[in-house]
Image (cartoon, grey):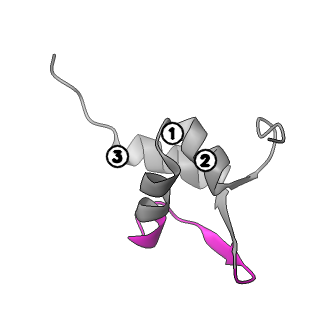
Amino acid sequence: MTNSINREWLRVPEAAQLLSLPRTRTYELIQRGELPAVRIGERSIRVNRQELEKFLLETRRVVDQ
């Protein structure tokens, strides 16, 4: 996998890895419109790094232990 640390647009597997989620769950979030993404052509989907960070900040919750 290419180093995604400095890239602005991420492939779904890279976004999933950063979120520590399975790829299928990440695709579900995109399909439901919860995680913004753009489709390039018929098969390529990209997630903007800033949108990914915004998603994390907006969906964070305090977890009771």
Could you tell me which secondary element the residue under label 2 belongs to?
A: helix
Kindly give the residue lying farthest to the top in the view shown: 65
Could you tell me which secondary element the residue under label 3 belongs to?
A: helix
**Does the segment drawn in magenta span residue 36?**
yes
**Does the segment drawn in magenta span residue 65?**
no
Could you tell me which secondary element the residue under label 1 belongs to?
A: helix
Mark 2 and mark 1 in contact (Cβ < 8 Å)?
yes
Q: Which residues are magenta?
A: 30-42
Task: Say above or below: 12 vs 58.
Answer: below
Q: Quadrant of the N terminus?
A: top right
Give me the residue at 49% from left, 62% from top.
Answer: 27
Task: Say above or below: 40 vs 49.
Answer: below
Q: Could you tell me the amino acid type at mark 3?
A: Thr
Q: Nearer the viewer, residue 8 or 31?
A: 31
Q: CA distance from mark 1 to mark 2?
A: 6 Å
Q: Tell me if mark 2 has few (under 14), some (14-19) or many (20+) residues whose alpha carbon lies within 10 angstroms of its own.
A: many
Give me the residue at 44% from left, 71% from top.
Answer: 31
Q: Main secondary structure of the magenta part?
A: loop
Using the image, tell me which numbered label, if any, was put on residue 19: 1
Q: Which residue is mark 3?
A: 59
Task: Say above or below: 26 vs 6.
Answer: below
Q: Earlier in the sequence, mark 1 or mark 3?
A: 1
Using the image, tell me which numbered label, if any, was put on residue 5: none
Q: Which residue is mark 2?
A: 15
Residue 21 placed where, x, y %?
Answer: 46, 41
Residue 19 placed where, x, y %?
Answer: 51, 39
